[in-house]
Amino acid sequence: MKEPTQIISTIRLTEKASLLSEHHNQYVFRVATDANKIEIKNAIEKLFGKKVLRVNTSQYAGKKKRERRADFGRRAHWKKAVVTLAEGEKIDLA
């Protein structure tokens, strides 16, 4: 069993994520690529002490980037989780 801090990497603070948190009580997290929805739900509930209703996930492929001369590298693949909290629950981002 993984620790909650191994599953949840960071919270994503983008314009779209801000709108989701204000209007739909949803928060966006960058999570471990091998984490499933149940592990993400349990990690959020344990870390923040909030009731999670739903977790939606999506995988992102790392972009191909140019390094130095003619070599090509790749950014890491990553996974995003959009977590919906119960009515009246909020996560303080300050």
Image (cartoon, rainbow, N blue to C red):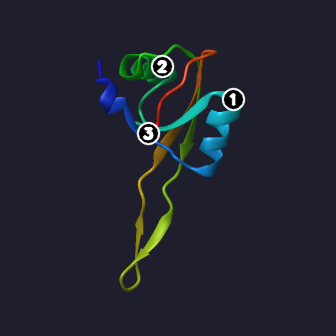
The crowd level at tag 1 (other Cα within 10 Å; few <14, some 14-19, many 20+) is few
Say the numbered circle drawn on residue 24: 1
The numbered mark, 2 or 1, whose residue comes first in the sequence reads: 1
Asked if marks 2 and 1 touch (Cβ < 8 Å), the reply is no
Q: Amino acid at mark 2?
A: Lys
Mark earlier in primary sequence (1, 3): 1
Other-residue count near label 2 (Cα within 10 Å), few / some / many at <14 / 14–19 / ≥20: many
Residue tagged 2: 41
| Three-letter residue code for mark 1 | His
Question: Is residue 66 placed above or below 86 in the rendered structure?
Answer: below
Judged by depth in the image, the label closer to the viewer, 2 or 1, is: 1
- Comparing marks 1 and 3, which lies closer to the viewer? 3
Residue at 50% in and 44% down = 12
Label 3, label 2: how many angstroms apart (C-alpha)?
A: 22 Å
Rounded to the nearest whole Å, what is the CA distance between mark 2 and mark 1?
A: 17 Å
Where does residue 21 sit, x and y in percent of width and height?
A: 62, 34
**Which residue is the site of mark 3?**
94
Q: Which type of secondary structure does the marked residue at label 2 adopt?
A: helix
* Quarter placement of the C terminus: top left
Do the residues under discs 3 and 2 have CB atoms within 8 angstroms?
no
Residue under the image location 37 percent in, 86 percent down: 69
**Farthest right residue?**
23
- As helix, strand or loop, the secondary structure at mark 3 comes to loop
At x 41% / y 22%, what residue is drawn? 48
Q: Quadrant of residue 2?
A: top left
